[in-house]
Image (cartoon, rainbow, N blue to C red):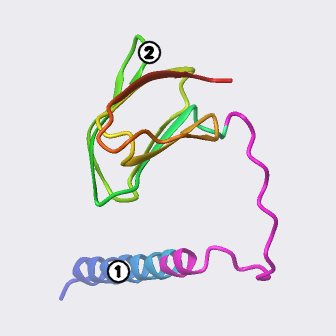
Amino acid sequence: MGIARLALAGLAVLAVVALIVVGALSLVGALNPDAGPSTPAAAPSATPEQIPTVRVQCLQEHCPKVFLKVAGGDVLLDREMARDEQAQSFDAKVDVVLADSAAVRVEVNGEVRPPGKAGERQEFTVSRD
């Protein structure tokens, strides 16, 4: 075997070992993201920029069509949702259409909007505070 083949084989082995080490470190980091002491820390209070203008969460196994659109702009969501699925927007003004307003939980600027009656269709526009 020539020296070039030995050098190439050695580089291949080093590359495999390096990939294994990087993979192991990534796995350890993913399984233990906080290596510090396990004392619970107080959650920071949300700033207005962190609170979505609107958040819609499906409460039933299957929620009929939910439509979210930036007022005068892009469509953010136009489909049915599954249980616990959420959609939110931080845009200044959002148009909302709910095919069944009782099937979803709607928060407007962090406050829960009262649900409608089962099967009731609702259309409204929400604005940032």
Residue at image location 33% in from the left, 45% down from the top: 118
The crowd level at tag 2 (other Cα within 10 Å; few <14, some 14-19, many 20+) is: some
Q: Marks 2/1: CA distance?
A: 52 Å
Q: Nearer the viewer, residue 2 or 55?
A: 55
Name the amino acid type tagged 1.
Answer: Val
Describe residue 31's horizontal placement relative to residue 78 as left or right: right
Give the magenta range.
27-49
Residue 4 appears in which quarter of the rendering? bottom left
Q: Main secondary structure of the magenta part?
A: loop
Residue at mark 1: 16
Residue at image location 40% in from the left, 76% down from the top: 19
Q: Nearer the viewer, residue 30 or 52?
A: 52
Residue at image location 55% in from the left, 31% down from the top: 90
User: Dot 1 lies on which element?
Assistant: helix
| Above or below: residue 78 compared with residue 24 | above
Rendered image: mark on residue 109: none
The crowd level at tag 1 (other Cα within 10 Å; few <14, some 14-19, many 20+) is: few
User: Dot 2 lies on which element?
Assistant: loop
Residue 59 appears in which quarter of the rendering? bottom left
**Quadrant location, the N terminus:** bottom left
Residue at mark 2: 71
Answer yes or no: do the residues labelled 2 and 1 have beta carbons within 8 Å? no
Residue 21 in the image, given as x and y percentages of width and height:
47, 81
| Above or below: residue 82 compared with residue 23 | above
In this view of the protein, can residue 57 be seen by the observer?
Answer: yes
Q: Residue furthest top?
A: 72
Residue 84 magenta-drawn?
Answer: no
**Quadrant location, the C terminus:** top right
In this view of the protein, can residue 68 be seen by the observer?
Answer: no
Residue 107 in the image, given as x and y percentages of width and height:
55, 40
Residue 57 in the image, given as x and y percentages of width and height:
44, 49
Name the amino acid type tagged 2.
Answer: Ala
